[in-house]
Amino acid sequence: MSPKYQNLVEDLVSNDYLQSPELIGAFKFIKRRDFVMAGMEQEAHYNAPLLIGYGQTISQPATVAFMLELLKPRLGDKVLDIGSGSGWVTALLAKVVGLRGQVIAVERIPELLDFTKKNVSKYNFDNVEFVSGDGSKGLTTYEPYDKIIVSAAAEDIPENILYQLKVGGRLVIPVGREAQSIILVIRKSEKDFSYQEFPGFRFVSLIND
């Protein structure tokens, strides 16, 4: 780990964006520079979003850390990663859930799915499935999921996604047009969900095909 990236991770810890040992370990092991566009490796340690093409970004590290701490991925979890983009979140999740777990990465832009695959392949994970398609309504193929994370902002929380969670499962999703919030949803029972809102974020939009 380069000194600059080490400083980034230490800053995320000291500012309480990263708290759990599992996620701290994943951030140290999975290097952000492996998930940026060629020529931008020296910017990977910045706590800022970076362009990855096609109008998409690799999210700000503090935002990724905040969302993953809300998600609480654990060893053995099955996680749906909607809008995999660069593959950085996919790889972080794959590291945390381990060989007993599974990460399903969905990306609607074929070129970015290729980018995801190329980047994640640097770590030789055997627990990641890649799916090309519209993830705005989730993915029924592998449901139910322990955790679902969405990396683009929806106007409203898609109901289909809610019911793809296991009871006790967690969904983290940005919602809103102009003033966006990150929403944590926990499925309490077959029909009941709890919601917690965290305002003050900016994301690209979740697109329906």
Image (tube, helix red, strand yellow):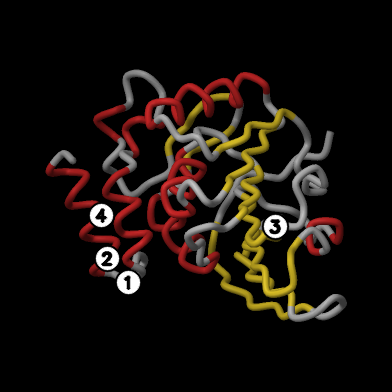
First in sequence: mark 3 or mark 4?
Answer: 4
Label 4–label 1 contact, CB within 8 A:
no
Q: Which residue is mark 2?
A: 13
Among numbered discs 3 and 2, the one appearing first in the sequence? 2
Label 3 belongs to which residue?
145
Earlier residue among tags 4 and 1? 4
Residue type pointed to by label 4: Val
Q: CA distance from mark 2 to mark 4?
A: 6 Å
The quarter of the rendered structure image containing the N terminus is top left
- For this rendering, which residue is in front, 206 or 195? 195
Question: In the rendered structure, are the residues bearing label 2 and label 1 in contact, judged by CB atoms less than 8 Å apart?
Answer: yes
Alpha-carbon span between mark 3 and mark 2: 28 Å
Residue of label 4: 9
- The amino acid marked with disc number 2 is Val
Residue at x-position 41% and y-position 23%: 37
- Of labels 1 and 3, earlier in sequence is 1
Task: Give left or right: position of 87 versus 54.
Answer: left
